[in-house]
Image (spheres, grey):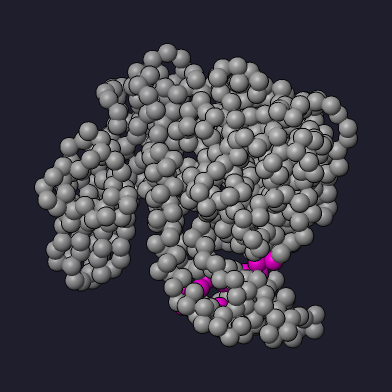
Amino acid sequence: MKRLLVLATLVGAVAYAAPNVTPELAAHLDGVGATELVRVLVVMEEQIPQDRIMALTDGLTRNERRVIVEAECSRLAASSQRDVVAFLEGRASSGRAADIMPLWIVNAVAARTDRDTVEVVSAMPGVAYVHWDKEIPVDLLQDVVPAFEDEIAWNVTKIRAPDVWNEGYDGTGIVVCVADGGVNYNHRDLADHMWTKAGYPNHGRSFTGGDPNDTMDYDGHGTHVAGTVASDGTAGSQCGMAPNAQIMIAKLGSSDSTWFAAWQWAITEGVDVITSSWSKKYPDYPAYGLHRAASEKTLAAGVFHTNSIGNQGNQTGSYPIPFNIATPGNCPPPWLHPDQTLREGISGTVGVGATDSGDNLAYFSGRGPASWDKERHPQCAPYDDYHWSPGLGLIKPDFVAPGVNVKSCDYRNTSGYTLKSGTSMSTPCAAGAVALLLDFDDALPPAQIERALELTADPLPGQTKGTKVNHNGAGRINVYAALQFLKASTGIDLKYFRAAGLEDRVRLAWDCESSAYAGFNVYREAEGDAADAGRERVNAALITGQAPFAYEDRDVVAATTYEYWLEVVPTTGKAELFGPAPATPGLKKAYAFALEPSYPNPTTTDATIAFSLPVGVSGEYAVTIYDLAGRKVRTLDAAASAPGRHEVVWNLADDGGRGVAPGVYLYRLNASCGSAVRRMVVTR
């Protein structure tokens, strides 16, 4: 049932009313003329759930992940946005709409429309709501404050970047997208390692609505940021953390839609790291929910996103906790620190605070915690987690980096430098550190990088090493320590750990990054734990063998939810616990529509695909295998639909009986009651 969102005047009269129009947009439309075009985002009801998109991409390379994320999100956007786009294009012919831009990263359509068009489109089937795509003055987006004169780029040595260079890692081959106000790509410290690709003569793209090739910086912010990532010292000062990383430019506009367009473009173009020192602040109605949805897609694509958190840490009266941290830096990180005992959703954006040269927290650095309580702030919807007071909230920032009196490239010439302060300056420092770690191992997923940076960070004064607390996060990053951590820990880091409830058992599956393990133990705990049994070990003997692994727990009670943990026992050193992975056996008997993970996955010989069809299903169903390019490989099963759980086996051959090549394949279930898609990996 459609909601009706309205805004009333002080005397109670309705000023503007339309189905599913946010109060902020309604208030704005009340003050504009009937023919004036207003920037809006038409957000669709249907969104890809995070657990689905993560299941599709678990264990894949970054390139495979981005291909799947774009393909799945684009497919949904094309089908769900079709009528909205056609309607807006029709209105555009009479001047009542313009600048129509479909966005797959949040499944929304950006456009400029008149009042009547907003009213009509908000009531169209499949539309969740229409949001004001407000343009914010650039100086309110950039997280920079005045700085004072200095002579050296002290931040480079502070996080021990030169020690990482000495080990042979300087960011070579890593692409960092600077999503900002443009970059002076002619600066001598940057010119020879700018990202290049045919069709992009100026090393990126502008999303401001003007010339898409105008990526030049006209206010100095973006050039300073880019220099902190990758200045190589050619003009005299070494300012960059990763001096050989490639800088890709995404020149932002001041509205949300331009940011989403920039991020999805960067993902499509193969970026490794996104860094943005622009943020949206409370109380100016940030589109929190849309930013988190975009961040989830970034994570699924395997892209690490560092973002500033604002410079309002000393203004908690105007910017109260838990909304002092600006978005998208308030989104959950890709890995949750053990001190984050309230463990809920994750995403791909890391919020970075700022410190001075003495490792003191900057007075302006944003203060945590953050919260995604939609009762406190409706713009958080549909997310409703990390409640605070009562509740822990979400510890923020995630970590801090040097951000006071930072020296970097000046946009006004090709050889100058300038000083700036702010979380705008600490954020690219972190992005450069990520580029160094990816130079060491470009297959590292965001969660593994975040884990290394947080667990090895140097504590701020009064903080205990290894802890994560509000305001400080996990401490000030130490990229050399993070590198050593990764070198020592790759033997026990998981690619994935999953649990699936079947009719009479729970199936667990996992894989490790390398073979430096002695074996594994599985632990579980029943939800509620009425018997007070606590966490118990499931397996009688240490689980050993070759990856990937699978284990079935048959000692379960139907319709009971269990949480499982996996203990990885290394050949030397201390064991480590991963989890929880929840599962509920026995629910398949209800025959809800479902497509299960294939088993085993990865596979070398064959793959079992299980699915369930509900009572009342009609017509035929089909299970079809596709490659990543969308080409059909095999129609595996097509038959009359019947309720219940079904299994089919693929022998890894195409329709002609030829064995398929190793790689990633998608399998899709189509039935009258719905469709679903998952992926599997074939190895030989």
162 or 650, which lies in front?
A: 162
Which residue is situated farthest in the right direction here? 148
Q: Position of residue 9 (x, y in %)?
A: 77, 81
The residue at the point 57 percent across, 41 percent down is 195
Name the side, left or right, on which 130 lies relative to 634. right
The residue at the point 46 percent across, 52 percent down is 50
Residue 497 quadrant: top left
Q: How many marks?
A: 0
Q: Position of residue 163 (x, y in %)?
A: 63, 18
Q: Position of residue 53 (x, y in %)?
A: 42, 51
Vertical relation: 428 (above or below) 153: below
Vertical relation: 575 (above or below) 584: above
- Regarding residue 477, the answer to whether it shows in the image is no
580 or 72, which lies in front?
A: 72
Q: Which residues are magenta?
A: 121-134
Name the side, left or right, on which 336 lies relative to 276. left
Is residue 131 one of those drawn in magenta? yes
190 or 6, which lies in front?
A: 190
- Regarding residue 20, the answer to whether it shows in the image is yes
389 or 684, which lies in front?
A: 684
The residue at the point 70 percent across, 60 percent down is 254
Q: Position of residue 310 (x, y in %)?
A: 74, 47
Vertical relation: 654 (above or below) 304: below
Is residue 367 one of those drawn in magenta? no
Viewport quadrant of the C terminus: top left
Residue 533 quadrant: top left
Which residue is situated farthest in the top direction here? 572
